[in-house]
Amino acid sequence: MNLRRPQMAFAPGRVNLIGEHTDYNQGLALPFAIATGITVTATPTGGDTMHVIASDLAAEDRFPVRAPGYAAGWRAFARGAAAELSAAGCEVVGARLEIAGSVPRGSGLSSSAALAVSLCLALLAVSELPPPDRLELARLCSRIENDWVGSRTGLLDQLASLYGQTGHGLLIDFRSLELSPVALALHGWHLVTVDSGQRHAHGAAAAEGYNGRRTECAEACELLGIESLREATVELAFELPDPLCRRALHVITENDRVRETVIALKAGDLERVGALLRESHASLRDRYEISTPAVERTVARLQAAGARGARIIGGGFGGHVLGLLPPDARLPDGAIEVAPAAGARLL
């Protein structure tokens, strides 16, 4: 091994066009990878220690490769990556890991999944190990977030980052894990994200937020005697007490909106896509209750600029808002156009 040669891995963030909080309910979603993401540069050191440097945080961490131990915050990602790769039979080597990112943290653009994916790819490359099947790698990265970071995420973010294709969204069926590319032809329309100004977090401290919604969905399934809300119907949902009824109704109707969005995209009906985004946001706000005043102000600002649809994206409780504007609209201040980009890769 050439100890002087660094290895670089990039993993993109993602925008979820529609299908929010459906992944851990074995539902449907339509995300796409974006151009911004996380780059990890790994340089082998020949020792048995991992030295991790997060340049944007001006922070660092050191831990033994074979016994990383737990840590809070961003440090949990590298420790979890080393531990999960080792548990999967990958003998990773000691290295200096430098993390740099262009996707904002806590934005709803999946910086956390991008970090986990880029760390794993860089560690595998610097250890001269072949990467596992990308589906297995997505599961491994999900375990990093679930078991090391304390965020009970599904597989949506990891799959979007790993399987992203330029010009295409990714229709994901989380029951079968079937992945189908869907052309995202906008015909001059603009997909943009706008920062609400409110950061969100999915760590263990957010038990009343993202993790709390997962718990409620599991409770709903237990009461209905089903494995997942993918099996639920509107009629069954109305048998549940509040707020479980509303949580289930969101998931059921959101799956339908994903199907309708795919049909609308294939027909080039962007007005219909906008209407479905509006419906998705209303359901996330009223049934799933993950919006905030800052998010609602951002939605209203996009609508005032002519957006046909705008909705919160990501786990909720802050982050960015997605808007779909017609070709002649003037983009509001702070709006960033987003488009489907390629997935994770070595540089």
Image (cartoon, grey):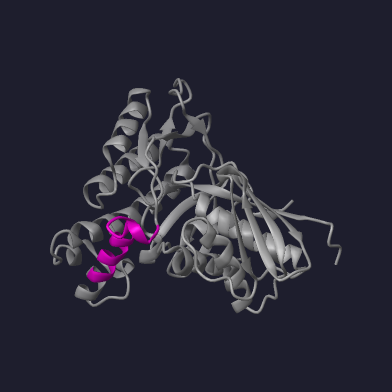
Q: Position of residue 127 (x, y in %)?
A: 75, 68
Magenta stretch?
203-219
The reply to whether residue 122 is visible in this rendering is: yes
Q: Is residue 338 above or below residue 302?
A: below
Give me the residue at 35% from left, 50% from top: 257
Give me the residue at 63% from left, 63% from top: 120
Q: Position of residue 234 (x, y in %)?
A: 21, 61
Magenta-colored stretch includes residue 296: no
Q: Is residue 299 above or below residue 257?
A: above
Q: Is residue 308 above or below residue 78?
A: above
The reply to whether residue 340 is visible in this rendering is: no
Front in this rendered view, residue 185 or 38:
38
The secondary structure that dominates the magenta segment is: helix
In this rendering, position of residue 26 left or right of residue 35: left
How many marks the image carries: the answer is: 0
Picture quadrant of residue 132? bottom right
Give me the residue at 66% from left, 64% from top: 50
Front in this rendered view, residue 233 or 205:
205
Picture quadrant of residue 94? bottom right
Q: Quadrant of the N terminus?
A: bottom right
Q: Position of residue 26 (x, y in %)?
A: 39, 66
Q: Position of residue 266 (x, y in %)?
A: 49, 45
Give me the residue at 36% from left, 31% from top: 308
Picture quadrant of residue 304? top left
In this rendering, position of residue 222 left or right of residue 40: left
